[in-house]
Amino acid sequence: MTFELEPLDPDDDRPPYEQVARSLGAAIRTRKLGPGEKLPSHAKLTEHYGFARATIQRALRDLEDEGLVVSRKGSGVFVRHRTERPAGLRPYVEQAFSSRNVTIDFAGFSSETLHGALREPLDKIRTGRLTPASIQIRILVPDMAVPQAAPVRREDGADDPRLRARMHEIMLGYTRSISDSINELAHLGLVQEGSVSVRLHSGTQFFKLYVINKEDVFFGYYPIRPNKVIAQGEAIEIYDLMGIDTILFHHSMNEGDASSGAQQVEQAQMWFDSVWETIGREATPDAL
């Protein structure tokens, strides 16, 4: 094989096809397998991993479903070009925790997706399968104490304090959970240093942004959709920012210093730092 695949974790209790998919996915995400590059044949992958051909086929199907590879009949399996596909956040977050020092900067409407993406790597730290020395997470969210462009009442497009209070509680729950989890790891001595900082800004957040280890960026837009929610015991028809419909696009420093991807990462980090250091306000203690 012309590149070094990430070794399988002997303590990994996931099915073999998931282990193979994760190993190949890591090679793609770290550019050991570049865009357009052909993957080794089924026979070579079977020999390398020591699993049956059916296991390899299932792993490749999962990678294709994820949008990382494309199968071309008679030619083989190839890595997709990044511009051809949206990206999944979870595998990249897990990969980031293989680094000694982990940094994640998030700007968005809430930190629900980040909260979900952190579960597996934090569990692996608790069991000793991942061992970063430090974790630093910065969360930048809108201040729900002030009126927002959305969510608003559908009937008249007006601000409603009940909707803002509901959104504040949602953000509070996720940010507090993330903070408690990281602080617990530091308290138990599983990481040398762990911190979660939250800052607020007055503008409506129409997009979500993740900057991971200052090397990878994920960016996506929140579409505004009609929705019906319960706020303070009353059902309200609203226009809402729908994170579930957000497609994330990936840019990486691994594409090269002069590449569009590297410039996207640099500009995203610059934007985040500029807001954080200027109009971002420290969250009050009840936001953690």
Image: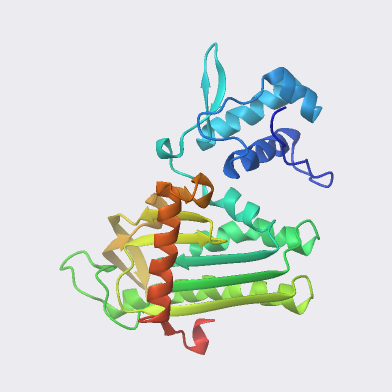
Q: Residue 75 falls in which quadrant of the image? A: top right
Of residues 68 and 142, which is closer to you in this image? Answer: 68
Farthest residue toward the front?
Answer: 258
Residue 230: image location, x then y, percent? 37, 68
Q: Residue 233 falls in which quadrant of the image? A: bottom left
Q: Does residue 57 lie above or below 35 as drawn?
A: above
Classify residue 125 as left or right of residue 256. Answer: right
Of residues 148 and 42, which is closer to you in this image? Answer: 42
Count of numbered marks: 0
What residue sits 49% from the left and 72% below the top? 139
Q: Does residue 145 lie above or below 72 as drawn?
A: below
What residue sits 73% from the left and 76% below the top? 186
Residue 114: image location, x then y, percent? 53, 61
Residue 277: image location, x then y, percent? 42, 80
Of residues 188 and 167, which is closer to you in this image? Answer: 188
Residue 30: image location, x then y, percent? 60, 45
- Name the image quarter holding the N terminus: top right
What residue sits 74% from the left and 62% below the top? 125
What residue sits 57% from the left and 59% below the top? 116
Q: Is residue 249 visible?
A: no
Q: Does residue 46 lie above or below 13 as drawn?
A: above
